Amino acid sequence: MFDLTFNVDDKGMLTPLTLAIDQAVIAGWTGRDPVARDKHIAELEAIGIARPATTPIYYRCSARRITQDDRIEVSGENSSGEVEFVLIGWQGRIFVGCGSDHTDRKVESYSVTVSKQMCDKPVAPVLWELEEVIAHWDRLILRSWATIGGARVLYQEGTLDAMLPVKELIARGFGGKGLPDGCAMFGGTFAAKGGIRPADRFEFELEDPVLKRKISHGYDVITMPVLG
């Protein structure tokens, strides 16, 4: 267990809140549309990653992998980010944030579970109350940008109506108990525009077009050499 301090955005007013995080869950294959979901599965199969055992599927990784830093270090040049909404349980409430499930793709080709443990998972420092956005959840927008070879390109974009409804996602993973206190769950992602590829910098955001606000963050990717 460790503490992370966020700012909760309540109608433009930011209130600091320190949360004790004791587990991290990476939900995968959460697409509502089976065609779009299978497109992402095929995208990963193309780089040697096997189909999941179930859809959706809930991977565990160390809670300590979650970070608010603006840079991460990775081994080799085979990792990449994925924008995702993040749900955090706390004292019976659920907060919504935004993060990147940064993953080592080479390791993912032989073990998805191990790959989830290989890289830090950057998250933005701002949260919303789920109850403030649940009525227009499907209209929320996820986006990411990748800086590759000095060029910043739109990497992912989509609305949450393409993913399982949030309450269904929680119920499938945790049953009637709901999201546990101290659990941070990443909620799935969209296919990459132009295919999955590494980047020198990754930026992401969650936009609420109804309440006119965004949660955003970015980080540099520092590649460490692999010496055999």
Image (tube, rainbow, N blue to C red):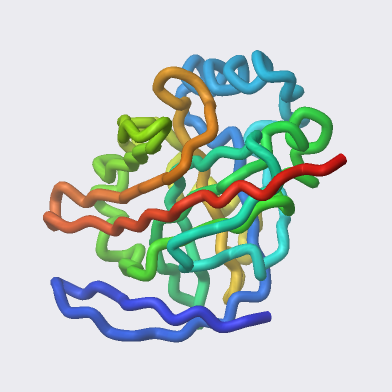
> Which residue is farthest right?
228
Question: Count of labels shown?
Answer: 0
Q: Residue 93: x percent and y percent?
A: 44, 74
Q: Is residue 166 visible?
A: yes
For image coordinates 58% across by 18% down, the residue present is 43
Q: Residue 16: x percent and y percent?
A: 33, 85
Image quadrant in which the C terminus is located? top right
Q: Residue 205: x percent and y percent?
A: 32, 50
Q: Nearer the viewer, residue 33 or 224?
A: 224
Q: Residue 14: x percent and y percent?
A: 23, 79
Residue 45, image quadrant: top right
Q: Nearer the viewer, residue 220 or 226?
A: 226
For image coordinates 24% across by 49% down, the residue present is 207
68 vs 1, left or right, is left
Residue 53, image quadrant: top right
For image coordinates 68% across by 80% down, the residue present is 1
For image coordinates 62% across by 60% down, the residue present is 176
195 vs 9, left or right, is right
Please say if 169 is above or below 154.
below
Please say if 104 is above or below 42.
below
Please say if 193 is above or below 1.
above
98 vs 175, left or right, is left
Q: Is residue 157 visible?
A: no
